[in-house]
Each structure stands twice: as C-alpha cells, then as structure tokens.
Image: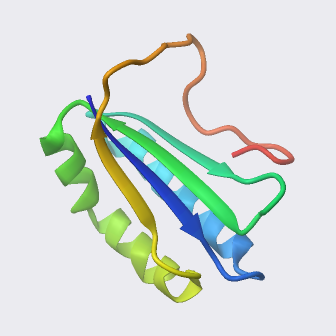
Amino acid sequence: MVTITAIIRVRKGSEAVMRQALLEVAAHVEAHEPRTVSFFVSQDSSDPALFTTYERFVDRAAMDTHNGSAVVARFFAIADPLLEGKVMLVTADEISAKACGGASGITGGPGLL
C-alpha cells in the first residue's frame, strides 16, 4: 500500500474555499477511483486554516493516476493562490494498518469532513 499525507495551510479567510475544494476531490475519488483505497480529509479543530489529507493507494500506478487526474489539477489551480507556504507531502510505503469496519466515505455535519 502506498500512502500520501499532505499538510496544507491556507491564509486566514480562505478556509471555506479550501474545504470545498478538498471535498470535491474526495467526492471524485469515491466515485471514480476504485484503486484509491481511502482518502481522508481533516480540518484542524483549533486552527481551521490547517488541513490534512491521508490517502491510501493499492500501488504506485493508482497513486500516479490520482495525482495526474484532472480533479487534482483543478484542486491545485484553486488551492495555489490560497496557500500560506508550500504543501508538505509525505509519500510512503505503509508498513502497518488497523482496519476499522464501517468508516468510509464522506461524512458531514458540524466540524466533520
């Protein structure tokens, strides 16, 4: 399993736009990327300008397909002007995971992504 962790900080006042852009990527992944095993988006509860994604792919080809997709290109076109600094990306080979049943898909509600 190949993973990507992204830490994204946006300028104050840009949080809602970033949140929506990330949720659009998540919806696309759920509908069109069967080889993306999971795609989590989080927004820091004490610093809403800080977002994190955690992405799990079957293999590097699946990761490359995701990263080369039109939805990711659109995300970065939206995100680039909002960013405060560079996106920190960590690409890794997963060495351990605990699977919990029933926790998949996009959730909503106050404070939840």
Q: Which residue occupies the extreme bottom position in the image?
A: 81
Q: Which quarter of the figure has residue 93?
A: top left
Which of the pair 9/40 is nearer the observer?
A: 9
> Viewed as shown, does residue 39 lie left or right of 101?
left
Residue at the left extreme of this rendering: 61
Q: Is residue 100 left or right of residue 109?
A: left
Q: Nearer the viewer, residue 95 or 40?
A: 95
Q: How is the image coloured?
A: rainbow
Question: At x 51% / y 50%, what residue is drawn?
Answer: 53
Q: Is residue 93 visible?
A: yes
Q: Which residue: 33% across, 44% down?
A: 32
Q: Is residue 41 above or below residue 46?
A: above
Q: Position of residue 12 (x, y in %)?
A: 76, 81
Residue drawn at x 29%, y 67% as measured from the top left: 70
Q: Could you tell me residue 15's position as x and y percent?
A: 72, 72
Q: Nearer the viewer, residue 7 or 31?
A: 7
